[in-house]
Image (spheres, rainbow, N blue to C red):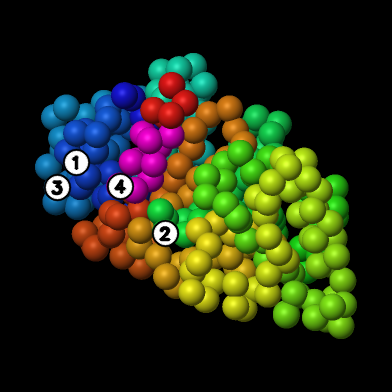
């Protein structure tokens, strides 16, 4: 099975993770790395690693930048975006069964004048679909109703129509029910004392459950106690940090990122470029390995 891999920001830990795990990954699938082979050879030299002989590369049609470890540059941003677009193309054209992304740097994308905050926002525009960001591990998954937006913009986003649409799109991907839906406010609003968004959340939950004629979602749950005991496997968070702080506290090294509600399969590592340890041979590979395994699992289910 062929899996397209976009290489992320070449100045971060992505290429170290890619090179160190090629042998292991190749036993699970046939990876197609969306990078010029000469650039990968330069990374291997900087890391004092052997360049794998059986490596399969597909080069993005863009100027090849220099590797400048731990530096934010428009050139690395442009290259990571080109790698990402190529990986999408390979997957859309059925030359790969799924897409796995290594970490980009959002500021580098901005400096390269790329009009997206990150992968998820790009997917939404490219596929004209309401892509859903879900992060987690086999022990816990959190879907984000809103993701990379300022906190002050979250409450206006919570409408019955938008949240209901989100829950209806998410429901087919919830394999272990019920899925807990977090309230927005402390104490889930305390019956309106601390906010009234929970009324909207409750109505959306009720409508989604009635649509499927079963209890897929429960809530709104009190956010600060919802994860205690971890009796649920799936949650919906109203905003980015509400869901990712408990997830990363519990399962940071092993968790992955899934993009749902797309016509292709996409998984990703659940960490950033880690410039503080770039090209120091210190990067952890658990998230990458898990992302590959999840992509293969979902591709087998689909195909």
**Image-quadrant location for residue 181:** bottom right
Q: Taking 258 as reference, is 28 above or below it?
A: above
Can you tell which of label 3 and label 4 is closer to the viewer? 4
Q: Taking 230 as reference, is 179 above or below it?
A: above
Q: Give the distance between the C-alpha atoms of the residues marked 3 and 4, in whole angstroms.
A: 19 Å
User: Label 4 belongs to which residue?
Assistant: 289
User: Label 1 belongs to which residue?
Assistant: 24
State whether residue 119 appears in this view: no
Quadrant showing the C terminus? top left
Mark 2 or mark 1, earlier in chain: 1
Can you tell which of label 1 and label 3 is closer to the viewer? 1
Mark 4 or mark 1, earlier in chain: 1
Can you tell which of label 2 and label 1 is closer to the viewer? 2
Q: Give the distance between the C-alpha atoms of the residues marked 2 and 1, in whole angstroms.
A: 23 Å
- Is mark 4 in CB contact (under 8 Å) with mark 1? yes
Disc 4 secondary structure class: helix
Q: Residue at point 17% right, 38% down? A: 23
Q: Residue at point 80% right, 61% down? A: 202
User: Label 3 belongs to which residue?
Assistant: 49
Q: Residue at point 73% right, 79% down? A: 186
Is residue 274 rendered to the left or right of residue 226?
left
Mark 3 or mark 4, earlier in chain: 3
Residue 241: where, in percent of width, then height? 60, 68
Magenta stretch, main secondary structure class: helix
Q: Give the distance between the C-alpha atoms of the residues marked 2 and 4, in whole angstroms.
A: 16 Å
Tag of residue 139:
2
How many numbered marks are there? 4
Mark 2 or mark 3, earlier in chain: 3
The residue lying toward the viewer, choosing from 249 and 113, is 249
Over which residues does the magenta segment extend? 289-298
Disc 1 secondary structure class: helix
Question: Alpha-carbon neighbours of circle 1 within 10 Å: few (<14), some, or many (≥20)?
Answer: few
């Amino acid at each position: 099975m062929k899996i397209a891999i976009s290489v992320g920001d070449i100045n971060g830990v992505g290429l170290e993770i890619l090179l160190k795990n090629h042998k292991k990954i190749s036993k699970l699938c046939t990876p197609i790395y969306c990078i010029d082979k000469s650039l990968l050879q330069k990374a291997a030299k900087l890391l004092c690693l052997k360049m794998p002989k059986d490596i399969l590369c597909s080069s993005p049609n863009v100027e090849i930048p220099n590797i400048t470890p731990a530096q934010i540059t428009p050139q690395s941003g442009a290259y990571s975006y080109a790698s990402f677009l190529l990986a999408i193309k390979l997957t859309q054209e059925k030359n790969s069964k799924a897409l796995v992304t290594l970490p980009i740097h959002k500021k580098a994308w901005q400096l390269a004048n790329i009009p997206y905050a990150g992968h998820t926002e790009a997917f939404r525009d490219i596929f004209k679909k309401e892509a859903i960001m879900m992060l987690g591990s086999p022990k816990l998954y959190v879907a984000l109703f809103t993701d990379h937006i300022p906190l002050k913009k979250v409450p206006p986003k919570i409408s019955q129509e938008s949240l209901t649409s989100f829950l209806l799109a998410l429901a087919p991907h919830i394999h272990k029910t019920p899925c807990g839906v977090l309230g927005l406010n402390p104490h889930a609003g305390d019956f309106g004392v601390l906010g009234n968004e929970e009324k909207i959340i409750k109505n959306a939950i009720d409508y989604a459950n009635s649509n499927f004629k079963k209890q897929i979602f429960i809530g709104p749950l009190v956010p600060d106690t919802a994860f205690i005991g971890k009796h649920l496997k799936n949650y919906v968070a109203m905003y980015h940090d509400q869901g990712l702080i408990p997830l990363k506290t519990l399962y940071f090294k092993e968790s992955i990122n899934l993009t749902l509600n797309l016509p292709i399969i996409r998984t990703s590592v659940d960490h950033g470029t880690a410039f503080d340890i770039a090209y120091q041979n210190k990067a952890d590979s658990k998230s990458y390995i898990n992302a590959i395994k999840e992509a293969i699992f979902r591709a087998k289910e689909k195909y």
